[in-house]
Image (cartoon, rainbow, N blue to C red):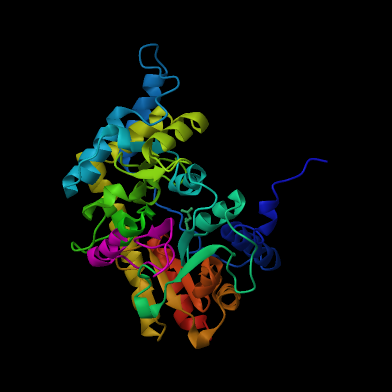
Amino acid sequence: MTQINSNYQKLQAGYLFPEIGRRVRAFQQENPQADMIRLGIGDVVLPLAPAIVSAMKSAVDEMGTLEGFHGYGPEQGYDFLIQAIIENDYISRGIELKNTEVFVSDGSKCDSGNIQEIFDIQNKIAVTDPVYPVYVDTNVMAGRTGSYLKSGHYQGITYLAANQHNRFCPEPPQEKLDIVYLCSPNNPTGATMTREALKKWVDYAKQNECIILFDAAYEAFISDPDLPHSIYEIEGAKEVAIEFRSFSKTAGFTGIRCAYTVVPEALKGKNSSGEPTSINALWSRRHSTKFNGVSYPVQKAALACYSLEGKKQISQNIQYYMDNAKTIRDGLTEIGIEVFGGDNAPYIWLKTPQETKSWNFFDQLLQQTHIVGTPGSGFGPSGEGYFRLSAFGLKEKVHEAIERIQQKLKI
Ligand code: MLT
């Protein structure tokens, strides 16, 4: 019989969100009348902005003509989209990028999961704890870790505890690391890294010749003008960081799929002879071998996010979700629940009442209020005793969820 990749045997149960789905389905089977409110997985609910719909429709119409038909596109993305990304997301913040440094893709989950392939298996990696599970699981699958320990950690990964003491933003450690995953605004804690905090990491990476994988998928939710949106706002970051961005939450593309990854040409790793090697060239090689590009209508739809009306419509949707975040924050605070995040991020990270274990709180919330959230411990052992609520819901449902929590949750 064919031997499987035994690294998969180290993985814990299912991926977090399918596991939540399984538990919710079981609950619904037993309680078919329950009116569920889902604030678990961070999936958008508002319809696409009209400017995006119209751009996508015309691109589809173009594809139905001989002159406008597009077959395989450039794997890295069409220049029209790459240029709009550079002008709007980077030049506007004083960052220069070349077209060849931006790689359009079908998602930040895929990119942040796939990127580890271009790095040697011996590299020492670090993640914050709690963490977006994709960073950890993809390294487990690749064989970069040992087994799963009782502590809830994998052997061979450095976990940097994110807790109330460090405002959920761990500082660089003493030890020398090769790859560090950072995410700001953070999934799951909703914490945001200040310029100073990010600079410490960039300096650390320079001193230790380490690469930072910076996930900025939620940058559009930042409203504080002092907070950085891109790691490249920090001087020297192009020599040490890769950045992931996505249209998923920014523009409601979770079902359409479009994202991009920036790999600066200044970023270098070393090859087996110790010579400096371009990471950009490696990612380009990987991308063009394993990926055929995002479809033309989807890239046209993404382009529409940068039109005047597109920008306006998208920011209204973002404001809608951030109003929900405020409703959740205020409503929980009123009943004495301690909350974090939710001010520059669409996630609210709450401390469970009476130090209830995260999964117990998940069951309690589901049974008493029929609300689905995400247990903090599902993101790592330091998430134990915390719980994540997503602001991606319909306003009326979010209000109702808060009312139910205030009236029905026994705390
Ligand atoms: C989440 O809820 O953490 C996100 O929706 C997951 C994702 O973006 O893949």
In this picture, residue 121 sits left or right of residue 50: right
Judging depth in this view, the residue of 62 and 353 nearest the camera is 353
Q: Quadrant of the N terminus?
A: top right
Judging depth in this view, the residue of 394 and 10 nearest the camera is 10
- Give residue 287's position: percent from left, percent from top: 46, 34
- Give residue 158's position: percent from left, percent from top: 49, 65
Magenta highlight range: 174-203
Query: In which quadrant of the rendered view does residue 22 lie?
Result: bottom right
Whether 315 is drawn above or below 23: the answer is: above
Whether 297 is drawn above or below 126: the answer is: above
Q: Say how many tags the image has.
A: 0
Whether 328 is drawn above or below 250: the answer is: below
In this picture, residue 370 sits left or right of residue 170: right
Is residue 202 in the magenta section? Answer: yes
Look at 70% across and 56% down and name the residue there.
9
Judging depth in this view, the residue of 259 and 127 nearest the camera is 127
The residue most toward the top is 66
- Give residue 351's position: percent from left, percent from top: 45, 80
The residue most toward the front is 273
Look at 28% across and 33% down and name the residue there.
99
Observer able to see residue 204? yes
The residue most toward the right is 1
Observer able to see residue 230? no
- Give residue 397's position: percent from left, percent from top: 44, 65
Is residue 371 in the magenta section? Answer: no
Look at 52% across and 85% down and name the residue there.
355
Judging depth in this view, the residue of 85 and 21 nearest the camera is 85
Look at 32% across and 32% down and name the residue there.
55
